[in-house]
Each structure stands twice: as C-alpha cells, then as structure tokens.
Amino acid sequence: MEDLDIKGILKIFLDKIRYVIVITTIALIICCFYTFYFITPKYKSVTTIVLANQVDYKDETVADLPQFAQIIKVNQDLVPVYSEIIKSKKIARQVIDNLKLDLSEKEFLENISIYIAKETTIISISVTNLNREDAAGIANEIVNVLSVEVADIYKMENIIIIDKAEIPEKAYNINHMRDLLLFFVIGIIISSIMIFIIYYLDTTIKNSDDVEKYVGLDTIANIPMIQKGLIVHKDKKKSSKLKPKEGNK
C-alpha cells in the first residue's frame, strides 16, 4: 500500500476548501429546517413514589427493628408488582376516563416509562405527551389511581409521593445547539471524505514526483514555466519583458 501523502492531502484540502464550506453550509441549512420544522415537540414529566408503610415511630423500640426490616422486604417485593399494575389496561382506562383524554389505551401505555431504583422501594413514573400540561397531569393521576387500586387489592396504603410531576418548561426531544453541532460535524466529515476520494482518484501529473509515482520513470531535469512575454530570473528574483529582436533595415 502506498504511503499516505499528508502534505498532498493537506494541499488539496486547502485547494478544495470551498467544497467544505458549501457542503457544511448545506448541512446546516438542512439541520435548521429539520430541527425547527420537522421535529414534533414532546414533553416529559416524572413523578416519584416510594413504597413505605406509615408507622408511628414514637412508640417503637429497638426490639421492633426486625419487624421494620420485614415491612421493608415486603415493600421491595411489591415494587415489580406495582410496576405491572401501573402498566395495566385497567389503570390506563381509569386515567383516560378521569382526565377525558383523547388517547387509546395503546397510545397511553406506549408513552409511560417506569424506572425502579436498584435495591430500593422507589419507583419513578415518566410520562411523554405532546401537551406539557397533560404530561404532568397524567403522571400525577396515575399515582392517584394506583393508590386506590392498591388499597382495593391489598387493603393497605403504602404509597408515598416523593416528587409530584411538574409541568415541563421545554420539550425534551429538541436541542437546537446539539443538532447544529451534529450536522456541522457531519458536513465536515462528508466534505473531507469527498476530498480524500478526489485526491486518490486524481492521477494527473502535477510535478516531477508524480512522474515517478504514476509512470515509474526518473526525471532528468525540470523545465521552468515561462509565461508569454515574461522571463523569470531566479538569480536576480525579478522579471523582465521579452523584447523582439530588431531586424536589419
């Protein structure tokens, strides 16, 4: 494999810099249209709950600690159960009816995400919606409906809200600066690849080194370029116009 001519690539890169500018500019224009006009804003709101039985600790003693540990273990075992209840169609139907949402059960459940903190009884419920108010409202209503459902099934109240869902200020799926930077980098990469390909496909002879490289012949001498009507004096580093010889009269 031929040695990589870094100087040659750099020279052709500088010669073709207009391609880089044009392609990068086009990429940024496409990015502006894409990020401002083609991305539908979506809003995300999160509520966090913890499973914990409400106990009056004032009357408890150290002897009761094993009982508390058992309560915590029970709640940890209930975390995956509660997660499945949250994603059930029954909860979806109830929340949709309560808030009078124009959503199907499938659409509702597709926009619900659940995160369980490892080795804890903490559950985070994330809701995505096109409307920022609905995103927060749905998240909070899920907790309300879940509490009623758990009380009906298990005859217990062990859901405590840590953080209520709040109305998000901006869409989570839109970041103009990130998109512009991404498309800028893409433009640079595409133009650089194109210039790199042009360099390796260009087999024209430009100097004596190219003669040896592409033809395999040794160069004996170089003939300096002489412009029409101009001789370049290398020794004096100046130029003079050629004058026609005067003929005999």
Image: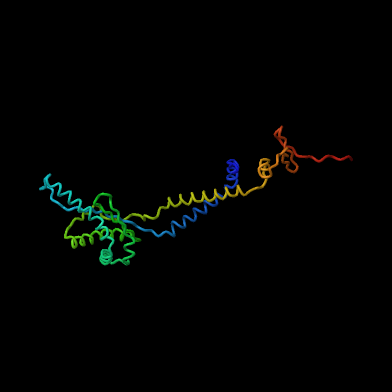
Residue 44 in the image, given as x and y percentages of width and height: 33, 56
Nearer-the-camera pick, 187 or 221: 221
Which quadrant is the N terminus positioned in?
top right
Which quadrant is the C terminus positioned in?
top right
User: Seen from this angle, which residue lies furthest left?
Assistant: 59
* Vertical side of 247 occupied by 180: above or below: below
* Vertical side of 198 occupied by 102: above or below: below
Colour option used: rainbow
Looking at the image, residue 51 sits to the left or right of residue 46; the answer is left
Looking at the image, residue 18 sits to the left or right of residue 240; the answer is left
Looking at the image, residue 16 sits to the left or right of residue 119; the answer is right
* Vertical side of 212 occupied by 33: above or below: below
Residue 234, by quadrant, is: top right
Residue shown at the point (46%, 55%) measured from the top left: 32
Residue 79 in the image, given as x and y percentages of width and height: 24, 55
Residue 245, by quadrant, is: top right
Residue shown at the point (58%, 41%) measured from the top left: 6
Number of callouts? 0
User: Seen from this angle, which residue lies furthest front?
Assistant: 1
Residue 106 in the image, given as x and y percentages of width and height: 33, 65
Nearer-the-camera pick, 180 or 220: 220
User: Seen from this angle, which residue lies furthest top?
Assistant: 235
User: Seen from this angle, which residue lies furthest right?
Assistant: 249
